[in-house]
Amino acid sequence: MSILKPWAPAGNVEFSFKKKSRKPKDLVTVCVTNFNYAAVICECLDSIVDQTHENIDLVVVDDLSERDESIAVITEWMEENKQRFYRATLIQNKRNQGPSFSRNVAFENALGEAVFIMDADNTVYPKALEKTYAALINGGFPAVYTQIEEFGDRKGIGHADIWDPARMKQNNYVDVMALIRKDAWARVGGFCHIEEGWEDYDFWLKFIDCDLNPGYLPEILCRYRVHNTSRTATEALSAHYDLELVMEFRHPSPQKES
């Protein structure tokens, strides 16, 4: 099921703990990607500890943080909280590779067949895993996403809604903070690095390309931290236009019959 290139450098395992008991059938892997978020990652990890879903496999992938003490902070936290998890592991990339590579590394190392993705600056409410896992299994979906709450520099509610391929082709309204079947991730080829950004949108568009329809759970279960941006309005507009062209090139709309 590996999709990483043979020449991709394997990361360094900085922390590893695993219980000796048999792997639970309802094991959910939580993938946390980190890059210089030492100041907030414990808040993220604490929200995972508080999950009502019992059996969790925690995989944190650090993308070679060098501006803070991320590895030391995460290692200390894992040592203190390891008994909460079936397994807890910290992997650090040997080179800074970006979020897509880090997420693929987490999927490659996941023990669960369902993987929840989140960045280290976000958090989840206590029933996020319990409810998304129930929806994933009972609904037979390839992935399940929820409504999000924005916090930080802006407070509000996200724009998530029922999955509609035609609407998704117009613009992305689904956050990557979702529970995804490992086989669905493999089928779409995982996450792709896009220099200009929008890797998350590209990932969901690949679900459309593969005729996979995720399920929407209309509850606020995930919290997305909003950061101030230093980009000017002109730069943002230019990047947005360029990325629209990139998405259309990578996922062309069907040609209409004349």
Image (cartoon, rainbow, N blue to C red):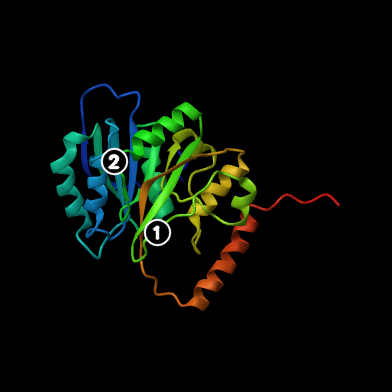
In-image side of 76 versus 194 (left or right):
left
Vertical position of residue 218 compared to residue 69: above or below = above
Q: Which mark is residue 126?
A: 2
Gap in angstroms between the C-alphas marked 2 and 1: 19 Å
What is the secondary structure assignment of the residue under circle 2?
loop
Foreground of the two, 143 or 69: 143
The quadrant in which residue 181 appears is top left
Q: Find residue 230 and report its image quarter.
A: bottom left
Asked if 232 appears above or below 38 in the picture, the reply is below
The residue wearing badge 1 is: 156
Percent position of residue 21, x then y: 22, 22
Name the residue located 30 percent from the left edge and 57 percent from the top edge.
64
Eye-nearest disc, 2 or 1: 1
* Rendered image quadrant of residue 114: top left
Q: Earlier in the sequence, mark 2 or mark 1?
A: 2
Front residue of 98/210: it is 210
Q: Residue at x 55, y 73 (%)?
A: 238
Image height check: is 146 above or below 238?
A: above
Query: Residue 236, how many percent across, how many down?
Result: 50, 72
On the question of residue 6 being in view, the answer is no
Which residue type carries mark 1? Gly
